[in-house]
Image (cartoon, coloured by chain):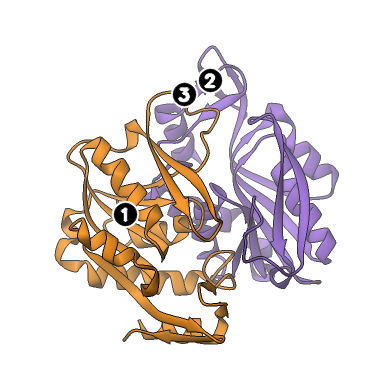
Chain colours: A orange, B purple
Amino acid sequence: MQILKNRILKDGLAVGTEILKVDSFLNHQVDVTLFELIGADFRTRFDDIAENVDKILTVEASGIAVAAFTARYFGSVPVVFAKKEQPSTMEGGYYFSEIMSFTKRKMSSIRIDKKFLQAGERCLIIDDFLAHGQAALGLVNLANQAGARILGGGFVIEKAFQGGAERLREKGIRVESLAVVEQIADGVITFAE
Amino acid sequence: MQILKNRILKDGLAVGTEILKVDSFLNHQVDVTLFELIGADFRTRFDDIAENVDKILTVEASGIAVAAFTARYFGSVPVVFAKKEQPSTMEGGYYFSEIMSFTKRKMSSIRIDKKFLQAGERCLIIDDFLAHGQAALGLVNLANQAGARILGGGFVIEKAFQGGAERLREKGIRVESLAVVEQIADGVITFAE
């Protein structure tokens, strides 16, 4: 997605060799015009399975707006965002998965209320970043617990050098990333294609 | 907003006298069709000042989708969501405010990077809930620190008996709530109007 890559080059900030800061348009300040184009591009990439998508899954917080804007292009299917803390009002059963955040260097956990993930549901994962793949693998784990199916994973930015796409594909999950970053070095961002 | 009130009565769950669970369409599973109507209704209510809005402010996580869908009806202005944790990549200056969460019975904090809140900017606060008003007052505090102006606050559901609207209006802030809940008791939800 060329407009996205241009925006990353213009406003993104490469920090060290691991971190790409895009908080001016993606995950702190949100450019909703860009998000509409992102949603439309996910639709194009998953067009062959779009009719089969029952639900879109993501993880709070920065995945929510991307997932919600994408849902508009998939027949406005429900979006479910996994929660990182157990809400005081989530008393019933929920699916739970522990995930490692390499950026924050700590374990965390995600959960989805059992009511919102049913056996047989066909789900698309949408998130802002695919790095080591821990959040997405956590969602796959939650879906497996529910007996739901993951049709694929769509990510705005993939950091290919952190291996998340490979880990998902090893589990048979199709991955579509709108911008694939091959390397971050000396403040320079290099795309894979 | 009648369609919202009907949805609350149909799918909302009154817990005790304080909590209204609407996680099936608002803050865990998201109904994007309803969110479009919500965005349009905020536009109608703030139509007289819509041209003046430079930015929409909210708090992660459940405010994000509401704010982003609302921005589409305000000329797609940027949305900034305050963060509850300091990201490892937020190293520069940021505005910071402590807030009390009555639902979770603990203090927490919100922050916005100084880059994304400028002196003179005219901001609209959009959030899913207005309860005691702590999150919204925290955003007002952040805006004050930046020298930005709050033109008003729009909330999907106001729990009037928890006093948040009064606290905001005491600070001269206009409040528009799409559904005002007057009472929760014995599992029954009563609207104010």
Seen at 55% across and 79% down, the residue is A14
A10 vs A121: above or below: below
In the rendering, at what x and y percent does residue B90 appear? Answer: 66, 65
Q: Residue at x 50, y 69 (%)?
A: A32
Residue at the disc numbered 1: A76
- Counting from the top left corner in percent of width and height, residue A139 is at 34, 48
Q: Which residue is found at the position 70% from the left and 45% from the top?
A: B135
Q: Between disc 1 and disc 3, whose residue precedes?
A: 1
- Disc 2 vs disc 1: which is toward the camera? 2
Q: Does mark 3 fall on the same chain as mark 2?
A: no
Amino acid type at mark 2? Val
- Look at the picture and state if A148 lies above or below A189: above
Q: Which residue is mark 3?
A: A91
Secondary structure of residue under mark 3: loop
Relative to residue A47, is residue B158 drawn left or right? right
Chain letter, disc 1 residue = A
Instruction: Please state if B5 lies on the left or on the right of B137 as rendered.
Output: left
Identify residue type, mark 1.
Ser
Q: Give the answer, above or below, for where A41 lies relative to B26.
A: below
Query: What residue do we see at 45% from left, 29% from top?
Result: B12
* Front one among A134 and B189: A134
Res B15 label: 2
Disc 2 and disc 3 in contact, CB within 8 angstroms: no
Q: Secondary structure at mark 1?
A: loop
Question: Looking at the image, is mark 1 or mark 3 nearer the viewer?
Answer: 3
Left or right: residue B127 compared with residue A6: right
Percent x, y for residue B75?
A: 55, 71
> Helix, strand, or loop for circle 2?
strand
Q: Which amino acid does the dot numbered 3 rest on?
A: Glu
For discs 2 and 3, the disc positioned in front in the rendered view: 3
